[in-house]
Amino acid sequence: MVGMANMDEHERKIVMEFVHLLEKSKQLFNGLRDLPQYGHKQWQAYFGRTFDIYTKLWKFQQQHRQILDTKYGLKRWQIGEIASKIGQLYYHYYLRTSETNYLNEAYSFYAAIRGRAYYSRAAKEDRSELMVKKLRYYARFIVVCLLLRRMKLVRELIVELDRHIADYTSTYEPDDQIEWSLVLDEIKGFIQSDSLVQVLHADTNPIVLSHRYIENGDRPSRRENPHKYLLYKPTLSHVLVFLASGFKELPTNGALLLYLSADGCFSTTKHPEDNQQHNGSLFTLFLHSPLTAFCYCCNLTTIPIHHWERCQSFVDRFVTEASRLFTRSRVESSYLQFFGDDFLRLLLLRYVFCDVVLHLHRAFKGRQYRPRCQPPLPEAELLEHPSLQHLVLDLAAHLEVR
């Protein structure tokens, strides 16, 4: 407990109020773990109370920093911990709502922690639990930067995290050093798979293009981000609960998409342990960035920016033509119901692009290499239509891979 003997009444009230806000904020934050991620009514009010108390705590320590420094002994890492908790609040609110404004707020607090070096003296405290908090902060900051496509900063943070993990393990020889090494390896693996194809600027430096991940570059702000649930190693009952909640929240013309990110039950190689490819699913890459997937299929690892932009126009023309054919073909009516939604339409058209590319590619001869859907899409009227095949072949010719 902080000594009150050398404080006047005003200082004592400030310290006591700070301690009260700090304890209340910790109680509310710890209670978040027990809240379900599904069902807005079950968690939104609690989040609101937690945000309110952390807002008061943050403003209070800013207004009374001098007294808290001298009388309470407030350390910089404690300020960093408060900021980190606020960043976590915004991040978890983003996970529950998929609203990117909250992700940007999380980034602001995490960036402030790094910019003001709140954890710079953590190692000098000689407390292993404080070092763990620092490492967790770095891991969370990296995840937020990945979601916001701040790849240059991600690489800087990975170098710093690598150094801090080395300091942590050499100083304390902890039991969790293997886990932290795995965390670092997973992040590095993600970066490696994300850079399958590098778009080069005129000075040959790789750049990140945001329009790689949208249909075209003129309408990104008009779409609302669809709500997502991210589950890590869930049980079957866990999955069923979230599926039921997701169906309950669906609009009348909506769809629930289930994506499983896991190794398959059966390996396609004779000796699975010899398989060194951990770059994710090619099908997922087509749905995520069609041009990147096309280049990857053709063993193109680098491409100049002017070529990329020209090739993107081929993909855009394909999407336009496929959209026209889709609405004129004899497709199952259920597909047309989803065609009015920007995201669902884009996924359907990228699926068509994937099918046409793999059908024409020499390395994927055979129906077993192409994606399948149910109900099936018409072959002659859509998937094997000459106009779509010509556009893919024109793209291949432009990249000199035909």
Image: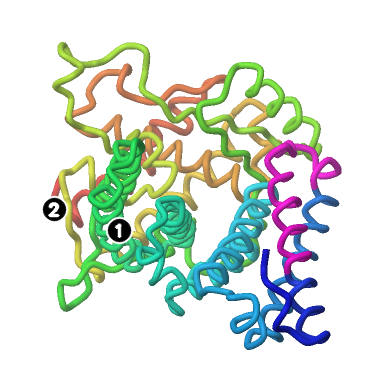
Q: Does the magenta stretch include residue 27?
A: yes
**Which residue is the site of mark 2?**
400
Q: In the rendering, which numbered label is found on residue 164?
A: 1
Q: Quadrant of residue 251?
A: top right
**Residue at coordinates 76% horizontally, 52% vertically from top-left?**
28
Nearer to us: label 2 or label 1: 1
**Residue at coordinates 49% horizontally, 72% vertically from top-left?**
113
Q: Quadrant of the C terminus?
A: top left
What is the x, y in percent for residue 225?
Answer: 64, 54
Q: How far apart are marks 2 and 1 (CA)?
A: 45 Å
Chain-order first, disc 2 or disc 1: 1
Amino acid at pointer 1? His
Q: In the rendering, which numbered label is found on residue 399?
A: none
Magenta residue span = 19-43
- Element marked by disc 1: helix
Q: In which quarter of the image is residue 50?
A: bottom right
Graded by Cα atoms within 10 Å as few (under 14), some (14 to 19) or many (20 or more), the crowding at tag 2 reads: few
Specify whether 160 is left or right of 215: left
Depth check: give the residue in front, 169 or 151. 169
What is the x, y in percent for residue 214?
Answer: 48, 57
**Residue at coordinates 17% horizontally, 30% vertically from top-left?**
276
> Up-down: is 352 above or below 137?
above
> Up-down: is 82 above or below 327?
below
